[in-house]
Image (cartoon, grey):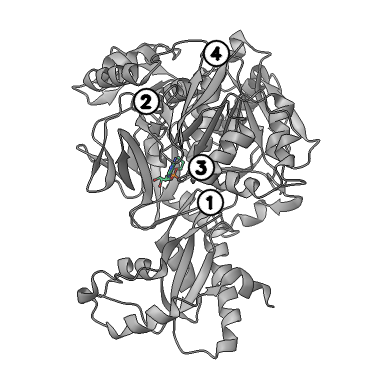
Amino acid sequence: MFVSDSILLQRDKFLILMNFEHEIVWENAQVYEEVYKNSIKDPNEFWMRYVKDIAWKRVPNSAYDNEKKEWLFGGVTNVCYNCVDRHAAKTSEKTAIIWHGDEENERREISYAELQQMVIQIASILKSHGIKKNDVVGIYMPMTPEAVASMLACARIGAIHLVVFAGFSPEALKYRLTTSNAKALLTITSFRRGGKEIKLAKNIPSDFDIDVINLDNISFSNNAEAGIEWQTSEDNLFILYTSGSSGTPKGVLHSALPYMLYVATTFKVIFGIRRDDVYFCTSDIGWITGHSYITYAPLFHGLTTVIFSGSPTYPQADRYWKIIEQEKVSIFYTAPTAIRSLQMFNKKLVKKHDLSSLRVLGTVGEPINKSAWKWYFETVGNKKCPIMDTWWQTETGGIILAPLRNLEQTPGVAGKPFFGVETDIIDGELVIKNKFPGLYKAIVHEHTTPDDALYKTGDGAVYQGTDVKIKGRMDDVINISGHRLGTAEFECAINKVSEVKESAVVAIPDELKGQTAFAYVVLTSPLERNDFAEIVKKIVNSTRNNIGSIAKPDYIVFVPDLPKTRSGKIVRKLLRNLANGGENLPELHSVINSEVIKILKVSVKNPIFCPDMCKLK
Ligand code: PRX
């Protein structure tokens, strides 16, 4: 029987003791330090232990080849083979995926043998459409077993998948598929979420020349064939777009085998997995968490992964708790925004469900505030489960910082670097100083690769003792409900409204969403006060159509001009400062039109709250 217990060390410091079934590589901070130091000194030794978890066709000589500067050089295998086929051969009846749909009675269970059939069927369809190794295939689907199988089908034939979150707009979809040169798009006609029908096929631009493969009526049979394309250390698995530090979307390319090693190992060690775990991650395959920790890591280890395509609050705000109770979920991984929004409902909605199967809780995507941490720890975890506040990014492929088990936990402090990853804080920014297998390979259409010397994360951080506390982005990225969006994406959409001359968008804190967008808008000609509602609506619609419904500015101020430098650059730091209520304004000397600052200082105090304005008509 699994035992865990929590000890309150002092105000806001917890020690959660956990017993794990296998492979305790450390049981206290001292042992962690030792294992960590050795993993940095000799990464090969550390990673070779986990290279053994992979089923190889040809085993690599070492984890990292210093000469070739490559992970797993010489190794040959296939990601799909490791996540599906080897389990279908040994534990064919074991449940690979449990799916819960929008309505409470919608449930499917897919065994490893059935998942294999599904994957082979989709892979053979892709082949019949001429898709070959290294071709890019778009996936625009809701959270279904078929979506997961589509990713694995690409991996099986060596194609590179490009998942586009189903909430992204036609424009965002087209941009991603075009800039990555995608050959085909896997999709379905429609799905239901929160009781509403979402017509996905309608979002595919009609003038868009791409081979659209609709998986609505796919049937799975034993007859389909699609052989495995063996992958080497040089092969790639997927491209996923995220918002870059310049604020525009960038396509992050990940390798196949080193990525698999990294996500499988971090998952195994950080969550301390057991063979009989039922694991539920509430992310979406449209984000990196859905790639690494819904699809690849849990299936690699042959666990049961629960996926949910509905809304956490439909028909009632207890869907997560209901699923945990029904499926006896043991590891639950979600985002702080979800916790904060569910925390607002009556505790009874949690307490009426038996959540005693839970033993590890995780969060990801944004800093978690103390109150949400405590509610998660006490109300959901019943003070028994550690909270793995995991910090990482699309670029890192897998988790970099986590409190790590049997070490002290402080709410809101992500904690310690994973073994083999050397982190540091330089000029207030979290950086990674060494090579690790999860790091991305390239940004596709910028044709750039990571800097050899140092990976700069773009996140501000401070040490709290020996732990790292993340403060948030230092660049032009806005993190709304854990969704990473660039200010330039917003501005581009806002500037498409014909009455808008220019705009600047900055992030401000939001109690529920973590951050939200605050837009300064300059119009081409002055408006009467009562005409603003129409423009606000146009702006909100334009962001929705060009990015997706997750991206709306919540606040707008109409201003006569934006502060600029001599070379015409908008002084964003000043705008950020003003929107965040700052009184000490930096860089004033560089602003050439300083007369506008006085006006900004006044108007910033009375922004239009868009949700209210949009309700007016
Ligand atoms: O700012 C950090 C924040 O999310 C950013 C990465 O976003 P994305 O690439 O979309 O990946 C999200 C899922 C891994 C980071 O630069 N972030 C992520 N996790 C945390 C976090 N901020 C604070 N604490 C976290 N645990």
* Closer to viewer: mark 2 or mark 3: 3
Q: Look at the numbered disc 3 and say if its residue's Cβ is closer than 8 Å to ligand 1.
A: yes
Marks 4/3: CA distance? 26 Å
Is 437 left or right of 156, judged from the image as shown? left
Q: Residues within 10 Å of mark 2 (few under 14, many from 20)?
A: many
What is the spatial separation of the Cα atoms under label 2 and label 1, in whole angstroms?
30 Å
**Earlier residue among tags 1 and 3:** 3
Task: Please tell me whether residue 206 is drawn above or below residue 126 in the rendered image.
Answer: below
At label 1, the amino acid type is Ser
Give amino acid for label 2. Answer: Pro
Q: Which residue is mark 4?
A: 86
CA separation in Å, label 4 and label 2:
19 Å
Label 3 CA crowd tier, 10 Å (few <14, some 14–19, many 20+): some
SS for callout 2 = helix
Residue at 22% x, 48% y is 427
Mark 2 — residue?
A: 258
Mark 1, residue position? 481
- Taking the spot 45% from the left edge, 45% from the top edge, the residue there is 367
Q: Earlier in the sequence, mark 2 or mark 1?
A: 2
Q: Which residue is mark 3?
A: 287
Q: Position of residue 56 (x, y in %)?
A: 42, 12
Q: Is residue 373 left or right of residue 347?
A: left
Q: Nearer the viewer, mark 1 or mark 3?
A: 1
